[in-house]
């Protein structure tokens, strides 16, 4: 190498040195970008574990009131909603694919201690309506007990009297009133309490079982589990009706959030990643679809023949679906754009602040319009359209003049916005389309709390 350098002319030597310096500078630049990327990732992980998740920013010239707080298998999609006159018994007998056993011999039944309150209700016999009580005599009395969720718990004791007509000798006894399903020793209030306590108040079944024991109710824990499963089966028609209603919406908001569900094959210490897809209708309905995958096929399968506007984040599965289906328009979420620039705030504080001020103006329009659709349409036309034009003009200008690498958080944020320009403008022409899909994030919060 030294011999080669000695043979070089002065011009060749200068050129060689410059090439070596350029190569060294490129290596140092890549190393610097890699280190910066790793530092951002570490900071992000630290913020997830220890920091605030709020995206509120107090801009110098805005008052506090003006600030915005951005807040195993796939479920089978219902093919049709059952007729309105369908009864619970019909659904239980026809709709269930696999019958869940609730026979007392396998569950241990329900037994009540003496401290459990008893509410007696006499069951009237319709066959004896209008009969002369003087001609009747009670020859036997039987009881049928059910647990009810009257604070805290109680026994609903139905009294069934077997009577004999003194004149005709005819013997008659009323039937036990139908329960939720055959051989069910639980009143609907008790089933509702189990479900609400488990899924709304996150009370595990074993704790509910302990509470029942403390209150004098002896019931097998497996029975409680089966009650939960069968109650869920009875809610299937509501689940299907909810989706049917949402698909009639003019605007649907959709998102997906990962959850841990089940064990990986052969690895009991590791869980699989699955996804809940909350779907939000224009009547504030929320439908939760569970899927083991994040594939775009999920969007296609669940939305089916939907016609209208689909509002979502920047995940390309939504835009791809809208582009392939005639009659569907894809709208992008401004909250996600704002979030990208907040992540770049430390790298380009002045430019980011300028953009956040514009975005704050967009959100002030939404706040001032409230639920008045006509006012929202007018304000978006008079104010928001001009602001959005300024934002994209500025982003294109900054991008053209920037010398930052593509890995810079600020450039990433610009690219995210520019690539979704059309979707981010949809809300300007349709007052029914929200500016973001933060309302779906409230649904994601329900998922996280339940996980």
Image (cartoon, rainbow, N blue to C red):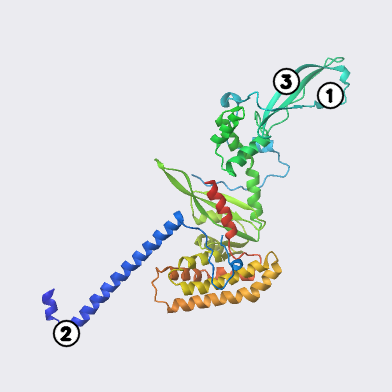
Asked which quadrant contains residue 145, the reply is: top right
- Residue at 50%, 45% (x, y): give it: 73
Of the image marks 1 and 3, the number of the one nearer the N terminus: 1
Q: Is residue 239 left or right of residue 350?
A: right
Looking at the picture, tell me which residue is in the foreground, 359 or 311.
359
Of the image marks 2 and 3, the number of the one nearer the N terminus: 2
Residue 175 rendering spot, x and y as whole percentages: 74, 26
Q: What element carries label 1?
A: helix
Label 2 crowd bin: few (<14), some (14–19), many (20+), radius 10 Å? few
Residue 128, numbered label: 1
Asked which quadrant contains residue 1, the reply is: bottom left
List the residue tagged with mark 2.
10
- Residue at 71%, 22% (x, y): give it: 143
Q: Is residue 301 left or right of residue 15?
A: right
Residue 142, numbered label: 3
Give the distance between the C-alpha atoms of the residues marked 1 and 3, in whole angstroms.
17 Å
Label 1 crowd bin: few (<14), some (14–19), many (20+), radius 10 Å? some
Q: Is residue 413 left or right of residue 368?
A: left
Give the distance between the C-alpha atoms of the residues marked 2 and 3, in whole angstroms.
115 Å
Q: In this view, does 387 lie to the left or right of 376?
A: left
Q: Is residue 388 above or below residue 176?
A: below
């Amino acid at each position: 190498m030294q011999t080669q350098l000695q043979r070089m002319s002065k011009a060749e030597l200068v050129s060689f040195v410059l090439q070596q310096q350029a190569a060294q500078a490129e290596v140092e630049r890549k190393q610097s970008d890699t280190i910066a990327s790793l530092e951002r990732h570490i900071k992000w992980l630290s913020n997830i574990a220890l920091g605030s998740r709020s995206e509120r920013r107090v801009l110098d010239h805005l008052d506090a009131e003006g600030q915005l707080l951005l807040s195993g298998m796939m479920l089978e999609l219902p093919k049709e909603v059952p007729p309105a006159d369908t009864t619970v018994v019909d659904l239980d007998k026809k709709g269930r694919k696999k019958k869940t056993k609730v026979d007392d011999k396998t569950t241990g039944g329900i037994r009540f201690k003496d401290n459990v309150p008893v509410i007696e209700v006499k069951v009237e016999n319709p066959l004896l309506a209008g009969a002369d009580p003087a001609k009747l005599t009670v020859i036997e009395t039987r009881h049928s007990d059910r647990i009810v969720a009257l604070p805290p718990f109680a026994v609903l004791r139905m009294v069934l009297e077997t009577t004999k007509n003194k004149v005709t000798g005819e013997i008659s006894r009323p039937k036990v009133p139908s329960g939720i399903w055959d051989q069910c020793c639980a009143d609907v209030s008790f089933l509702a309490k189990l479900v609400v306590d488990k899924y709304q108040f996150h009370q595990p079944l074993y704790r509910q079982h302990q509470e029942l024991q403390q209150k004098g109710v002896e019931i097998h824990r497996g029975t409680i589990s089966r009650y939960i499963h069968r109650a869920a089966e009875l809610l299937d028609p509501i689940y299907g009706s909810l989706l049917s209603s949402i698909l009639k919406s003019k605007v649907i908001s959709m998102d997906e959030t990962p959850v841990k569900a089940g064990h990986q094959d052969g690895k009991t210490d590791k869980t699989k990643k699955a996804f809940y897809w909350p779907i939000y209708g224009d009547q504030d309905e929320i439908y939760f679809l569970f899927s083991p995958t994040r594939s775009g096929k999920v969007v296609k399968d669940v939305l089916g023949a939907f016609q209208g506007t689909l509002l979502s984040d920047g995940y390309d599965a939504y835009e791809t679906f809208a582009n392939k289906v005639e009659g569907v328009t894809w709208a992008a979420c401004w909250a996600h754009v704002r979030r990208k620039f907040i992540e770049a705030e430390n790298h380009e504080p002045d430019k980011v602040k300028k953009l956040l001020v514009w975005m704050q103006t967009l959100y002030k329009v939404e706040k001032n319009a409230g639920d008045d659709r006509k006012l929202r349409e007018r304000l978006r036309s008079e104010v928001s359209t001009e602001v959005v034009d300024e934002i994209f003009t500025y982003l294109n200008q900054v991008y053209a003049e920037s010398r930052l690498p593509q890995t810079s958080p600020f450039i990433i944020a610009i690219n995210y916005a520019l690539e979704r320009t059309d979707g981010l403008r949809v809300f300007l022409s349709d007052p029914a389309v929200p500016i973001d899909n933060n309302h779906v994030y409230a649904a994601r919060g329900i998922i996280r709390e339940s996980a």
